[in-house]
Image: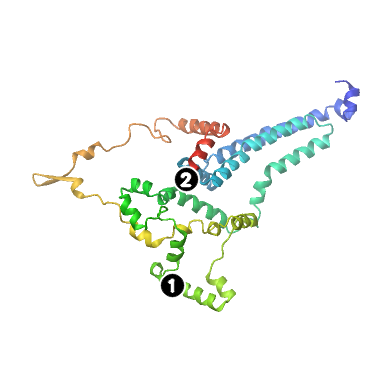
Amino acid sequence: TSDQEREDGGYDLEEYRDGTYHAMTLVICALYLVRVVPDTLITFHNTMGAQNTAYSRLLSLRQLLWSQGDDTLAQMFGYKLDIYMNTAYVSALYLLNIYIIMHTDTVLDIILNSLAFEFVARLDEETTKTLWWDPEQRWITAGAMSMVLQTTMKLKWLKDSKLFSQEFAVDEETLRAACRNDPNLLWNSLVSSEDTNNTAFMTKDEIITSRFRKVAHELNNENAIDEYEKPPVYFGFLDRYIRKFLHQKDRSTFNRFINYRTWSRWEKVLYMSPVPSLDDLFVTKHGKVKLDKSLDKIGPPDEKFVNFDPDDQGELGKRMFAYHAANVLLLKHVFPGLKNVW
């Protein structure tokens, strides 16, 4: 490129000849090399749930929920969006910035473009660190508890008589009869509403609070109602209006499992599973009680655990991390996950 063409393109020829453009570009690239690249790798590792931090452990739990296929479509979308926003998006943003600063015609624009991209890349993370964002950590606690319940309770089993009977060895006809032939079993908004207000399923403190709440409604005392009745809480105004539009009042942040509070059905179903008989575990020979030899067949699997190998010296973890990272970038688990939800 000739000097005339550079001048027509907006370059300051004096700064270009003395290497100011090149020096500033090298400074930015060096900054990315010593700070941005390591930070991006750590963020990538943290996002995959492999770090010893609260955030990474929550993501590890979230990955378990994804693997089980027990998350909702909205949860799947948000989870994958969070992963890509903290990995591929940030990396692509910095690569785009390098390309732009190499084609910028003034030193000041190089600096401003770099600052602008840095601001865009960290805007969402810095917002969550502010004092007004979840000061008492209620939102993150609610989200963590929601994941624990979804991971351990197997909510799909509680809403399907066939799955429930298979997993807990309960007769399906007896199970459906205990739930009044309701196909949703332990998930029912009407029964939940009745049982929640039934004093037979309350503690002494809950009974007192219930009576106070009833009197507050009878007297139409708004202050007392606020004291004894927790209002539905939503994650921002957008969530509130979406739930209102979809008529999902039971989907507020702290009431997402309220329809499972069918205590009258739980009381019937909870002890339906057969209890193992001691006669099946022990045998008596010559006056001595011994374990049944059939139990000797029960042992650890021949295959090695996917996340533990005592002879691997940590190499398996690195391979698993690389394999998982590749699957995320290639969208390998997106379509099977969507199939499970539908």
Measuring from the top left, give residue 153's x and y in whole percent.
42, 51
- Give the residue at mark 1: 207
| Residue at image location 84% in from the left, 33% down from the top | 106
The relative height of residue 168 versus residue 305 in the rendered view (above or below) is: below
Pinpoint residue 298: horizontal percent, then vertical percent. Answer: 27, 38
For label 2, count other residues whose C-alpha is less than 10 Å away and answer few (under 14), some (14-19) or many (20+): many
- Tell me the element at label 2: loop
* Colour convention of the picture: rainbow
Residue 329 occupies which quadrant of the picture?
Answer: top right
Q: Nearer the viewer, residue 36 or 193?
A: 193
Q: Residue at x 66, y 38 (%)?
A: 90
Q: Which residue is disc 2 drawn over?
A: 70
Task: Choose between 272 and 115: the one closer to the eye.
Answer: 272
Q: Is residue 318 visible?
A: yes
Please name the amino acid that badge 2 sits on.
Answer: Asp
Residue 115 vs residue 121, the one in the foreground: 121
- Name the side, left or right, on which 6 lies relative to 80: right
* Residue 239 placement (x, y as % from top left): 61, 55
- Asked whether residue 66 appears in the rendered view, the answer is no
Mark 1: few, some, or many residues within 10 Å (few <14, many ≥20)? some
Q: Residue furthest top?
A: 2
Instruction: Please state which of residues 254 and 156 is positioned toward the viewer in this rendering.
Output: 156
- Please state which amino acid type lies under the numbered disc 1: Ile
For this orientation, the residue located farthest to the bottom is 219
Where is residue 181? Give x, y as percent: 37, 55
Residue 227, above or below 268: below
- Residue at position x 71%, y 41% from top? 118
